[in-house]
Amino acid sequence: MPKIFFLVIIFLTGFCGLNLAQEIKTITTGVLNEKAKTLPMPQIPPVQPRIAGQVIVQVKINLQTGDVVSATAVSGHPLLRMPAEKAAQEARFEPILKEFDTIYATGVLIYKIENFNGKTIENKTPRPILPVIDSSKAIINGKAIKLEKPEYSEEARNACAKGKIEVLTLIHNSKGNVITAKAISGNELLFESAEKAVMKSKFSTGNFDNYNDFYLLGKIVYNFDSLSKCLSVGIVNKKAIYLPKPQFANPANTKHFRIKEEQIVAVQVVIDMDGKVTSANAIFGHALLRSACEYAARQAKFSPVWDLPRILVSALLIYKFKPDGTIDTNIESNDKKIISLIKNFVR
């Protein structure tokens, strides 16, 4: 195999690894001894020359679990470094910021030579690893001095994605910069753009009783309704010129599929100006029925009556499954019972 192929593979592997590393958030802290819930002491090496001083170990902590993921001695007598690293690796901290993924804190544990006794300190009331003011239920858009607007991707446009997106945001108060952001509600097609916009935003700093070095956990809200170029028209079963029913091996056969009472499945579809369904997403109904309904909805056809450029139609296709194994798609657009049933699920 050509050598250039291996070079390309090595380059791509390194590049992907670099991008992955950039996604991991790390917060720098200070001395962590008093913040440890469980702090094992190192065991002094057997029969060694006279040793004095202290050992400083840099640790990396998973904030979601409180576990130490790495420990490296950065100062101290060489004979003490390994036992200090081993003890630090076994330290445990109170988990925080559980709502996020992959956030680490780096800090140091300091061991003095007289404490190399192998005992474990159990701290019933450890100080928090990070000072965090939890305002996760509060909207903090007004705290931003520069709130970036999210991009509306082509994928989101083609799927008529819209609505409110809530982004849980962690801010370093003294600097006003965003540490991490995670979208927690809304259309998932809009999550990435909303998170990226928050990460680029800047927030005002605050001063509380002369103490400013803390982290603020709050919520940023974006509304994508104004970006969507879609018409919402409700239930369109009667307007389809071709509306296939979901296919199962044998709905009437109990070995394959059987329902005891009527089931409704609602599929939100996007229809282009040629009358083709470009997107289908089941928003209501039994989990075992959704996939087949989505597949059937993608095959549906409509008359090309929407001729405005770049305007798509967001609509609903309804499938009614009956206990006798039949599937009814002859649904009226003004069916109040169905509308009432699914109204809270429509995006």
Image (cartoon, grey):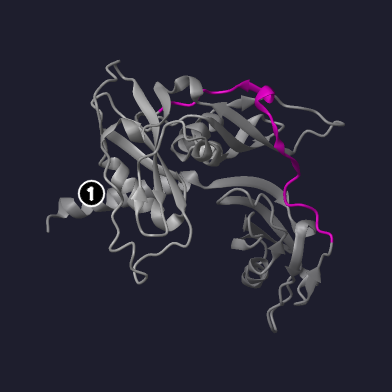
Residues packed near mark 1 inside 10 Å, few (<14), some (14 to 19) or many (20 plus):
few
Left or right? Give the position of 139 relative to 289.
right
Q: Quadrant of the N terminus?
A: bottom left
Rendered residue at 29%/46% (across/down) = 296
Bounds of the magenta segment: 125-152
Residue 252 spot, x, y in % from top left: 34, 64
Q: Looking at this view, is 146 or 232 the one in front? A: 232
Instruction: Kindly identify the amino acid type of the residue bearing the numbered disc 1.
Output: Val
Q: For numbered disc 1, what is the local secondary structure? A: helix
Residue 52 in view (yes/no): no
Residue underneath mark 1: 8
Give x and y (percent) for residue 128: 76, 52
Residue shown at the point (75%, 37%) measured from the top left: 213
In terms of image quadrants, where is residue 137?
top right
Magenta-span inclusion, residue 142: yes
Total number of numbered discs in the rendering: 1
Q: In which quarter of the image is residue 92?
A: bottom right
